[in-house]
């Protein structure tokens, strides 16, 4: 296997994106929500990015790329429509920087898989460059099964698990609950409220 799927926390990371087009916008949409500090270097910006820049959510250096732009980057996303510029940006990134070259994945070490996010549930699919369109199609197929309600169920499981980690529960009780909550019956909002109220009382927290 060439690449290893992992979860990365981008909060506070200095991300420099070279290019301000559609692909840059696709990457920035995700990274900005994840709390990264984003600087875009590009003579022009896609409307979605212009709006983020106007709101002060990303920084825009309105210029063509120069090597100094990636001096302090922890993550570099080379997403211009000029392969040579992308290559140049990759070559000047500091050694420990994670790099995504949108036009030639093999030139970097960071790839963005097709993604489905519902609450705390993330499902990502990669074909490791074989067919991004297939990855996207698989995600579309999965999105029927893993819908918004499923996302809320996963968020419910998170809340339960936080409560179950408290000393009010024995190791065995915790284990038993974590297993039990996977049953189909806990998918309904009614059952979820009922369980949360019960667990909160057990931990001494007032039920909502
Ligand atoms: C390595 C990777 C990511 C990375 O950049 O990290 C990558 C790389 C490249 N994609 C290229 C082309 C296209 N990519 C798409 C679409 C998507 N590409 C995505 C992921 C990935 N693409 C990662 C690998 C994932 C995997 O392999 O499973 C999706 C799933 C997610 C996303 O991008 O967010 C997103 C679904 C969008 C959606 O659902 O809407 C389309 C179709 C379209 O846009 O409609 C085309 C044109 C058709 C074609 O070429 O197949 C090129 C050639 C560029 C050139 O020719 O210059 C490269 C470079 C290379 O192959 O090296
Ligand atoms: N990874 C993926 O999923 C995909 C990757 N691609 C690749 O991504 C590249 C970018 O695609 P789009 O965003 O659709 O292109 P685009 O044409 O929408 O945007 C290109 C951006 O690069 C900027 N730019 C050009 N020269 C520059 C320079 N010297 N310095 C700084 N910025 C510069 C432009 O101002 C523009 O904002 C494509 O050329 C292709 O190789 C394309 C499709 C999918």
Image: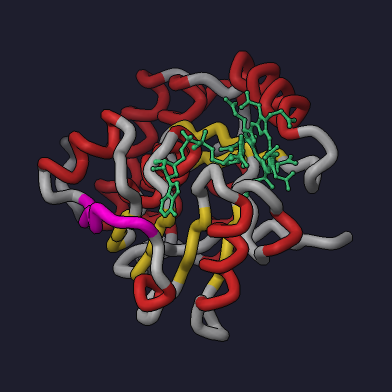
Q: How many marks?
A: 0
**Left or right: 71 with respect to 203?**
right
Query: Can the viewer see residue 176?
Result: no
Q: Nearer the viewer, residue 200 or 95?
A: 95
**Left or right: 124 with respect to 76?**
right
Residue located farthest toward the right when viewing the structure as drawn: 1
Q: Nearer the viewer, residue 170 or 87?
A: 87
* Residue found 64% across the figure and 19% down from its top: 140
Residue 120 picture location, percent across and down: 45, 42
Q: Nearer the viewer, residue 203 or 143?
A: 143
**Left or right: 91 with respect to 201?**
right
Residue 107 picture location, percent across and down: 70, 63
How are the residues colored? secondary structure
Above-or-below relation of 47 to 198: above
* Residue found 21% across the figure and 56% down from its top: 59
Residue 99 picture location, percent across and down: 57, 66
Q: Nearer the viewer, residue 101 or 185?
A: 101
Asked if residue 75 is among those painted magenta in the image, a careful observer would answer no
Above-or-below relation of 185 to 44: above
Above-or-below relation of 103 to 39: above
Residue located farthest toward the bottom when viewing the structure as drawn: 95
* Residue found 77% across the figure and 61% down from its top: 3
Magenta residues (range): 58-64
Query: Can the viewer see residue 164?
Result: yes
Residue located farthest toward the left when viewing the structure as drawn: 55
* Residue 30 figure quarter: top left
Quarter of the N terminus within the rendering: bottom right
Residue 187 picture location, percent across and down: 50, 23
Quarter of the C terminus within the rendering: top left
């Amino acid at each position: 296997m060439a690449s290893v799927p992992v979860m990365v926390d981008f909060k506070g990371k200095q991300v420099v994106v070279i290019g301000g087009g559609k692909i840059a916008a696709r990457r920035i949409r995700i990274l900005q929500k994840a709390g990264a500090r984003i600087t875009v270097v590009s003579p022009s910006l896609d409307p979605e990015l212009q709006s983020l820049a106007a709101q002060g959510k990303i920084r825009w250096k309105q210029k063509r790329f120069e090597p100094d732009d990636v001096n302090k980057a922890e993550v570099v996303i080379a997403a211009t429509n000029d392969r040579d510029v992308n290559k140049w940006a990759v070559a000047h990134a500091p050694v420990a920087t994670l790099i995504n070259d949108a036009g030639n994945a093999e030139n970097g070490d960071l790839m963005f898989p097709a993604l489905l996010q519902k609450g705390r549930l993330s499902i990502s699919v990669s074909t490791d460059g074989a067919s991004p369109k297939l990855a996207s199609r698989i995600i579309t197929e999965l999105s029927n099964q893993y819908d918004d309600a499923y996302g809320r169920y996963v968020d419910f499981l998170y809340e339960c698990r936080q409560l179950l980690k408290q000393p009010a529960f024995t190791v065995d009780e915790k284990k038993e609950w974590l297993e039990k909550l996977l049953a189909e019956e806990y998918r309904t909002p009614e059952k979820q409220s009922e369980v949360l109220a019960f667990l909160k009382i057990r931990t001494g927290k007032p039920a909502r």
